Amino acid sequence: TKKLAAAHAEGRATYSFEYFPPKTAQGVQNLYDRMDRMHAFGPAFIDVTWGAGGRLSNLTCEMIKVAQTTYGLETCMHLTCTDMEQSKLDDALTEAYNAGCTNILALRGDPPREKEKWEQAEGGFRYARDLVKYIKQKYGDHFDVGVAGYPEGPDEDTNADEHIAYLKEKVDAGGTYIITQMCYDADIFIEWAKKVRAAGIPDSVPIIPGIMPIQTHASFLRRANWTQCRVPPEWHEKLEPVKNDDVAVREVGKDLIADFCRKLLDSGITMHLHFYTMNLAVSTRMVLEELAVTPSSDSTDPTIKPLPWRQSLG
Ligand code: FAD
């Protein structure tokens, strides 16, 4: 978070890329190549998700290590705490520590694939808050610990307003930044973020919006439906007529997402955008280029810094 704060103080927007562990060895190699190329876009950090219940956890740890040590990227490892023995948590934290990773996104976790509901492991943790506390107890300030926020509520048990109290507990336990579930409605996001601040979560804790770029019409609908996020009606009006043309969908989607990002940046609520890349480069790159915050796409020099946000808008 110090690195982000320093960039923001200079008026520079920052961004980060999220990846998930691919299923095959070839997929992993392809992703490493892509991560390396996407390094040239200038992300402040990259993060790697954690399979619910620890599925593919060795791969998450390995990807963090490779990204951190081979590609020289700043990394953030996701870590979930339910449906998993404590020893697995300890191993993961040790591996992250040894790899030089200094950021963990502490989560409760989705239910593992084969289960409908998540479960607390015996003697283990129940909420993300408990994991935040544990990491802080064990590692002091070595890790910057992030937590998840939900502008439209986390699940059917808790609405967005109720969850703000739990979000505050996570921050009070030691969380230093908030990354949100994907959202497509800027007004909902901005209103929610104001409530988060009004609840006493200080400006020093960045609220980082999760941005899901649009790749195809089908995946856009599926993900919006899966997370139950509101899609502004005009988005449907613009995407529906081109839905069978993937290139046109990406082009229209790029404008919609870039506009959404601009509204959030202009609101002053955030200076950082977190992209759910879905392990793909094109849509994320198109949005960044539209926002004019990134070095040119064919640049291979990872040291090029993003242009100052407001200046680059002209
Ligand atoms: P919590 O904040 O602990 O909340 C879980 C539930 O418990 C909510 O209903 C909340 O309202 C309730 N609650 C919290 N505290 C209390 C309390 N003190 N008393 C009573 N009720 C309480 N999942 C994965 O499996 N792997 C990933 O890599 C992953 N990455 C994610 C990244 C982001 C940015 C986001 C937003 C989510 C991610 N998830 C991931 C999904 C996440 O694990 C689920 O959304 C999970 O259901 C909730 O996790 P949490 O950390 O937000 O939980």
Image (cartoon, grey):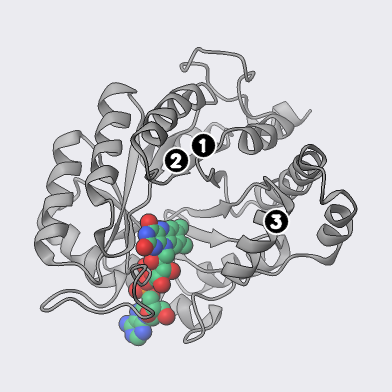
Q: Is residue 26 visible?
A: yes
For the residue marked with disc 1, what is the amino acid? Answer: Ala
Split into 4 quadrants, where in the image is the C terminus?
top right
Residue placed under numbered mark 3 in the picture? 218
Question: What residue sits 57% from the left and 25% below the top?
Answer: 306
Q: Residue 59 occupies which quadrant of the picture?
A: top left
Is 152 above or below relative to 43? Answer: below
Alpha carbon of mark 2 to alpha carbon of mark 3: how far? 37 Å
Is 219 placed above or below 195 here?
Answer: above
**Which is more toward the observer, 61 or 39?**
61
Mark 1 and mark 2 in contact (Cβ < 8 Å)?
yes
Q: Which residue is mark 1?
A: 9
- Residue type beneath disc 3: Ala
Q: Which mark is residue 236?
A: none
Give whichever of 267, 213 is nearer the camera.
213
Residue 169 placement (x, y as % from top left): 34, 74
Judging by the rendered image, the residue that carries numbered circle 2 is: 5
Which of the two residues, 55 or 90, is positioned nearer the viewer here? 55
Q: Nearer the viewer, mark 2 or mark 3?
A: 3
Which secondary structure lies at badge 3?
A: helix
Within-10-Å neighbours for mark 3: few <14, some 14–19, many 20+: few
